[in-house]
């Protein structure tokens, strides 16, 4: 993410930061850039990014992320919107050294979202039984520009 100063006055949705509980990918998709409430999932934790329509709203540089799980893009470094909403059991990634390194990167992103947007407001259903998801495919070592 490139640094973008926070807008001074944002009209927040009435349900801003309210819990959504456990939601499906289809439900998450309704919180896309065309809506006032904007949600993003990182490794199954749903963050409310509605206070940054300048980033995630329809005219923002990251508008395509809103309403999606962006875990695979953050993990793999393939930061294209066709990589949103791909679900894998990342604990099955091999080799172990690469898995550990990629988890460190993913958790850095998770920490960024928590610091920037507060505690998650929900959980994505797909990750509730992550161990049943397929193993991730191998990825080339790319530098993430997100």
Image: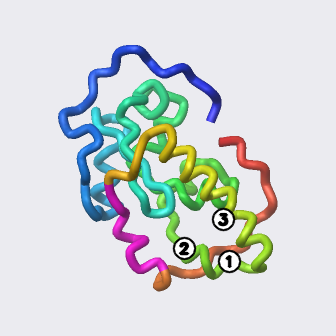
Residues at marks 3 and 1 touching, judged by CB atoms closer than 8 Å:
no
Where does residue 1 sit, x and y in percent of width and height? 62, 36
Most foreground residue, 37 or 33 = 37
Residue that appears at 63% across and 81% down: 92
Where does residue 115 sit, x and y in percent of width and height? 51, 42
Name the disc covering residue 88, or none.
Answer: 2
Horizontal relation, residue 40 to residue 143: left or right: left
Horizontal relation, residue 52 to residue 86: left or right: left
Horizontal relation, residue 86 to residue 2: left or right: left
Most foreground residue, 61 or 44 = 44
Where does residue 19 sit, x and y in percent of width and height? 25, 52
Instruction: Identify residue for label 3.
Output: 103
Identify the magenta region. Answer: 122-130
Where 117 sits versus 142, above or below? above
Residue that appears at 29% across and 38% down: 37
Of pointers 3 and 2, the one earlier in the residue sequence: 2
Q: Is residue 145 magenta?
A: no
Of pointers 3 and 1, the one earlier in the residue sequence: 1
Mark 3 or mark 2, which is nearer to you? 3
Query: For mark 2, does the 10 Å Cα neighbourhood hold few (<14), some (14 to 19), or many (20 or more) residues?
Result: many
Residues at marks 2 and 1 touching, judged by CB atoms closer than 8 Å:
yes
Instruction: Identify residue for label 1.
Output: 93
């Amino acid at each position: 993410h490139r640094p973008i100063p926070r807008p001074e006055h944002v009209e927040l949705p009435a349900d801003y930061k309210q819990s959504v509980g456990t939601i499906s990918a289809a439900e998450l998709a309704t919180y896309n850039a065309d809506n006032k409430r904007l949600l993003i999932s990182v490794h199954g934790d749903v963050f409310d990014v509605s206070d940054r329509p300048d980033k995630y709203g329809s005219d923002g540089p990251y508008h395509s992320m809103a309403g999606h799980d962006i875990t695979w893009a953050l993990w793999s470094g393939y930061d294209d919107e066709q990589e949103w909403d791909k679900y894998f059991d990342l604990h099955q990634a091999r080799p172990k050294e690469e898995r550990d390194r990629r988890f460190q990167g993913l958790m850095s992103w998770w920490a960024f979202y928590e610091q920037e947007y507060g505690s998650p407001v929900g959980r994505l259903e797909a990750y509730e039984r992550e161990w049943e998801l397929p193993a991730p495919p191998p990825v080339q070592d790319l530098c993430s520009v997100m």
